[in-house]
Amino acid sequence: MSGGKIRVLIAKVGLDGHDVGAKVVARGLADAGMEVIYTGLRQTPQTVVKIAVQEDVDIIGISLLSGSHMVFIPEVIRLLKENKADDIGVFCGGVIPVEDITELKKIGVKDVFLTGSNMKDVAARAREIYAERQELRHAR
Amino acid sequence: MDERDMTNNTTNDTTNNTTNDIKSVKDAAAKWEKEKRQPFISERPERRSLYKNDLGHEIKPVYTPADLAERGFDYEKDCGFPGQPPYTRGAWANMNRSDHAYIGCYSGFGDAEETKPRYEKVVKWGCTKLEMAWDLPTQIGYDSDHIMATGEVGRTGVAVDTFKDIEIMFENIRLDQIKALQLLANSIGPIGLGIQIALARKQGVKFSAMQGFLQNDVLKEYCARGTYIFPVNSAVKLSCDVVEWCINNAPNWKPLCICANHLNAAGAGSHNAIAFAMCNAFVYIDELIARGYKIEEIVPLMRFLVDEREDFFVMVALPRAARKVWEQQVGKRYGVTDPNSPALRYDVSTYSHGGETLTEPINNILRIGFSALGYYLGGSTYIYCAGYDEAMGLTSETTCKVAIRTNQIINNELGFSKTIDPFAGSYFVESLTMDIANDITKQVDYVMKNYGDAKNAMDKGYFQGVMSQGSVRRQAEFENGERQFVSLNLFPTDEQLPTGAYRMDPAVEKRQLARLAAVKKSRDQARVKACLDNLREIAQTNRNTVDAVVDCLEAYCTLGEICDVWRGVYGEFQTLTTF
């Protein structure tokens, strides 16, 4: 692993105001030694991708409890591709029906963390996603 | 009959205990500890190194009269009788022996046509306080056709764009047929109240023959729930407009519910959450006093949502402690000396949650039921039971019914409602009540002394810091196994996670957009413009906005149009990025 810290953007997309989980994950990843930026509430997919590119993050973690995940998350993935930034890994969490997990992974979401997840699992996955990105960048 | 039933003296009144009695109990306890418990532990070690609750209190193996004596417990001063200071035993003199606690049901999804039959069913099943769940665009003042509403219409609740949607849902439900109608309307209080007023007028129901309830507690949105729209001071002004209107026109309504629940869920801890919520309450009270109202006119229109999700006995003790602290705080801060003043009464509402899991969700019926029971026995007069499938998404019809039945069983079966405050005198529950009351008092005094008021404490990030620490602690305790959830981190399930969460038919969103377009086309455009212009002028000149909002709703102005007027006058709050 290179000497740089893993950079993570924790994002709230849409109008959902429930951000306990997002903040706990943000704190947990920061405590695990990563550099974490939190978008605050009510971001659009456009602003999330813009911040991610500007801040040169390795990973975007999106929190959604409002049932709008199948609208916003595919849009974030699409915009990352459009901006040639799809080496940034995306994971998400919140209230997401299990039926949707396969579909989300199919379009490129690295992992989905539901209620009851462990912070050390999230941190471990973040490290893996980071490593994948490093390899991708090396290959390019 | 069991011999113990005949010999066990259930009155634990320590005021009759002399110092000698207490010394004798202490000696006996020390003897028991040394001769019985310690030898037992040496063979059968305790399951945990420390027993504690989520508030951080260490829980002892047994409680005795000595624990009450140590805390200076005095029956009349600390406990008393229901319906009089210090209100520990209940807000009302005869509590549930006269009136059942309100039975709430929070529901709504898709559009008005989808939601209408659900409301008709839950009322039939016995819901006495119908709570409308709104989708996020409605709560934040965006119409369904606004760009910010993309993907959100009808998802977390029903979409309401104009008064037309309300008319559809309440075609067959009269407001005097249910005990109360509740809207959350935290950032758009005057709209929530306006809907209740317009609906009552349309149905010809007198304000005195029904009860409008609102949450309308906007302050907690800035640090916990997140549906804020306007800068804090303007938002507080709108919330207070609602209370002011009701003081003058519908004093039996409950237009302000001070919420500790969101603050606790965000990590505050149930004691701190109540303290912060009380500080929030003082902000509204101060604003209304500045408008010329007396505290005796204001507080009876308020209710108080307390919250605990981890410990049954805290659920019992919390409402008891909170009522007592309120009586003391209001007496102290507002100079209320008359013990009969209604300002001293803190009427408790609760949402029953008990750490529901996504795994094996049917077991959540028990968790929620225990929670409802704890609050009931602690003297909550309004109880909403969560749907046992809430961790999956919106509640289904079946889970709404189970939630209503849970309340009805507690209200009517198994002897729960026969006597008032049955845990009074329990050495443990009274000790806990004293400790929690002490915690709440210390935290309220700390905030008021160091920050002056809740707005400043939030502005400086104090509330958020306490909540953030708590949520991280709870997650760590879950991961290290201290917080246990059966089927999750204890006896992990071998079942698949449940499927079948509610999904909105995409046709519903199209139908909502079509209805909105049709209403916009058919309404009297000149009247719409005049109503919005009038609202703007009233907002600019800082007068009460409620009547102007009712005019707007009756003219079928959209909720977005009304909020855009306010956005133009007040501006918007910008999100915080700290965590």
Image (spheres, coloured by chain):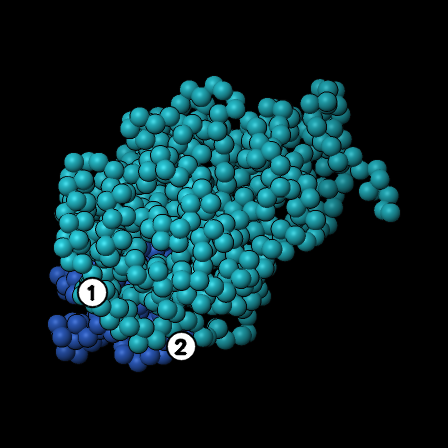
Image location of residue B321, percent across then percent down: 53, 35
According to the colouring, which chain is blue? Answer: A
Please state which of residues B540 and A82 is positioned toward the viewer in this rendering: B540
Q: Report crowding for label 1: few under 14, some 14 to 19, many 20 or more residues within 10 A (C-alpha).
A: few
In three-dimensional space, the C-alpha distance between marks 1 and 2, rounded to whole angstroms, equals 42 Å
Question: Is any atom of residue A9 visible in this view?
Answer: no
Image location of residue B45, percent across then percent down: 67, 50
Report in which chain the residue with disc 1 lies: B
Q: Residue at x 46, y 75 (%)?
A: B499
Q: Mark 2 belongs to which amino acid?
A: Glu
User: Residue A55 falls in which quadrant of the image?
Assistant: bottom left
Q: Quadrant of the C terminus of chain A?
A: bottom left
Q: How many marks?
A: 2
User: Residue B85 falls in which quadrant of the image?
Assistant: top right
Q: Is residue B431 left or right of residue B350?
A: right
Image location of residue B373, percent across then percent down: 60, 50
Q: Mark 1 belongs to which amino acid?
A: Ser
Please state which of residues B397 and B61 is positioned toward the viewer in this rendering: B397
